Image (cartoon, rainbow, N blue to C red):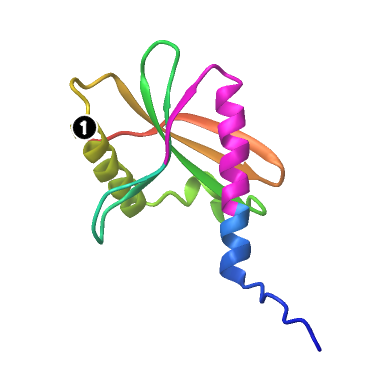
Amino acid sequence: MEIPRKKVTAAATTKQAGDAAEDRALAHLASHGMRLLARNYRTPGRGGGEIDLVMREPGGTLVFVEVRKRASRSFGGAAASVSHLKQRRIIFAARHYLMRLPQQPPCRFDVVSVEAGEIEWLKGAFDAS
C-alpha cells in the first residue's frame, strides 16, 4: 500500500518563507531592545489591514512593522514593494489597534526587508499623513 504524500503548494512555501522572514525580523528588532506586543494583527472584516509586528521601543514608542521578503534586490527590492495601498491598509490597522489603548503613545511605521540573506531596518519608512 502506497502512503499518500502531502502535496506542497507554492502558497504554503511562500507562507513558510514569509513566516521565516518575520522570525528573523523579530529576532533582529528584539536584539535592539524592542519588545513584541502583537504579531500578525488583523482588523476584523474584509478589506481591512494587517500589521506584521507591533513592537515597543525601550523609550515607549509604539512601532508598527511591515516585514518584506525578496530573493533579490531586483525591481526596487523589498522595501520598494510597500505600495501606497499597502501603506493605507497598515495605517488603517494601526488606527484600529490604537483605539483599544487608553491613551495614544508616540508611533512610527518601519519596514524590515529581508533580501538575499541581509536584513535592512528602515525606521520611519512612511507616515500616516
Characterize the local packing of mark 1: few (<14), some (14-19) or many (20 or more) Cα atoms within 10 angstroms: few
Relative image position of residue 26 (x, y in whole percent):
56, 33
Q: Residue at x 19, y 20 (%)?
A: 103
Name the spot of residue 47 as percent of width and height, x first. Answer: 25, 60
Q: Is residue 104 magenta?
A: no
Asked which quadrant contains residue 101, the reply is top left
Task: Reply above or below: 93 against 129.
Answer: below
Vertical arrangement, residue 2 with respect to residue 45, above or below? below
The C terminus sits in image quarter: top left
Q: Residue furthest front?
A: 1
Residue found at the far bottom of this picture:
1
- Residue occupying image coordinates x 61% and y 56%: 16
In which quadrant of the rendered image does the N terminus lie? bottom right
In magenta, the rendered stretch is: 18-39
Q: Position of residue 72 (x, y in %)?
A: 67, 52
Residue occupied by mark 1 = 100
Q: Secondary structure at mark 1?
A: loop
The residue shown at (55%, 26%) is 29
Q: Amino acid at mark 1?
A: Arg
| Residue furthest top as drawn | 59
Residue 105 sits in which quadrant? top left
